[in-house]
Image: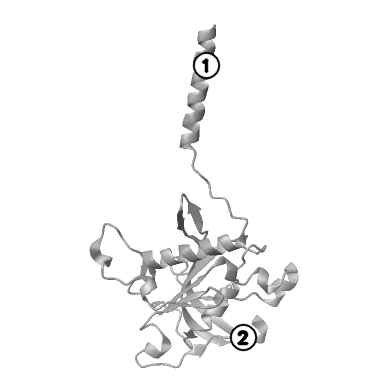
């Protein structure tokens, strides 16, 4: 009887040990907001080192098996500018209105500017797993490039209409990503490209969580998220009163 009991006990301990070894460590959000901000900063730097822009300005990850991208420049080598808020923007040479042939006068993006944009907007959570800090796999917030293929006017995370705010009882900070609006002010939009024009993305804006929603409640339920925007402004104009 004692031997049976010992066998059962040994089997149970072995099963428990095996289960513990097989368990995947899950990331726990740090309580200290300064640690979160540090994770974002380190993960964004790694993201910029691991990605480049292709011939149409799309963000692409370097391949470890294909030598075709060996001569491409990292995002971190494309003169990224970091604002006091932590927002990073990268302007792609050759893709701005003034780079057109012939050159055209671009429209400055201001708070009152309505934009029509081709955009790929992804969100990430910077994590620390066994000392490896990275953004991990991105999830789409909006993707007109691989989705509809048509520009979108004033996406909600850029501008939310008063009628929506009134109906929800929420202010614009609940919807809009302030870091995106801040970064766009360093770009100029085209005055009026036709929707059917092939896209030529103007650059990248990276918004760490502290310049997005931080830990505040928001429409997308994306606390602590870092956002990466890859875009072209097809049209920029003063927002009509009917769209405010």
**On the image, numbered disc 1 is attached to which residue?**
8
Q: Nearer the viewer, residue 49 or 52?
A: 49
Q: CA distance from mark 2 to mark 1?
A: 72 Å
Depth check, mark 2 against mark 1: the one in front is: 1
Q: Is residue 77 left or right of residue 105?
A: left
Q: Say if residue 167 shows up in the picture.
A: yes
Q: Is residue 172 above or below residue 136?
A: below
**77 left or right of 174 in image:** left
Give whichever of 167, 68 is nearer the camera: 68
Residue 191: where, in percent of width, then height? 48, 88
Say if residue 123 shows up in the picture.
no
Depth check: give the residue in front, 29 or 116.
Answer: 29
> Residue at horizontal 58%, vertical 54%?
29
- Up the image or down, 47 lies above or below 108; here it is above
On the image, which quarter does residue 168 sit in? bottom right
Quadrant, the C terminus: bottom right
**Tag of residue 242:** none
Mark 2 sits on what residue? 112
Q: Residue at x 51, y 28 (%)?
A: 16
> Counting residues from the N terminus, which is met first, the one under dot 2 or under dot 1?
1
């Amino acid at each position: 009887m004692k031997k049976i009991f010992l066998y059962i006990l040994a089997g149970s301990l072995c099963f428990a040990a095996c289960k513990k070894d097989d368990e995947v460590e899950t990331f726990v959000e740090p309580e200290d907001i300064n640690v979160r901000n540090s994770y974002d900063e380190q993960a964004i730097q790694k993201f910029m080192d691991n990605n480049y822009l292709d011939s149409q300005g799309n963000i692409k990850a370097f391949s470890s098996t294909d030598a075709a991208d060996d001569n491409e420049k990292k995002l971190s080598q494309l003169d990224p500018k970091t604002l006091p808020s932590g927002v990073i923007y990268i302007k792609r040479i050759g893709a701005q209105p003034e780079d057109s042939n012939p050159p055209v006068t671009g429209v400055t993006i201001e708070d009152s500017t309505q934009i029509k944009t081709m955009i790929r907007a992804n969100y990430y959570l910077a994590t620390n797993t066994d000392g490896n800090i990275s953004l991990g796999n991105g999830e789409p917030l909006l993707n007109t490039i691989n989705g509809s293929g048509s520009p979108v006017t004033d996406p909600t995370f850029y501008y939310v209409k008063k009628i929506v705010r009134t109906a929800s009882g929420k202010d614009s900070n609940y919807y809009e990503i302030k870091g995106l609006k801040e970064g766009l002010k360093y770009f100029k939009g085209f005055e009026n490209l036709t929707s059917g024009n092939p896209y030529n993305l103007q650059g990248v804006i990276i918004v760490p969580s502290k310049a997005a929603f931080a830990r505040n409640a928001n429409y997308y339920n994306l606390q602590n998220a870092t956002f990466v925007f890859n875009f072209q402004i097809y049209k920029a104009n003063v927002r009509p009163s009917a769209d405010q």
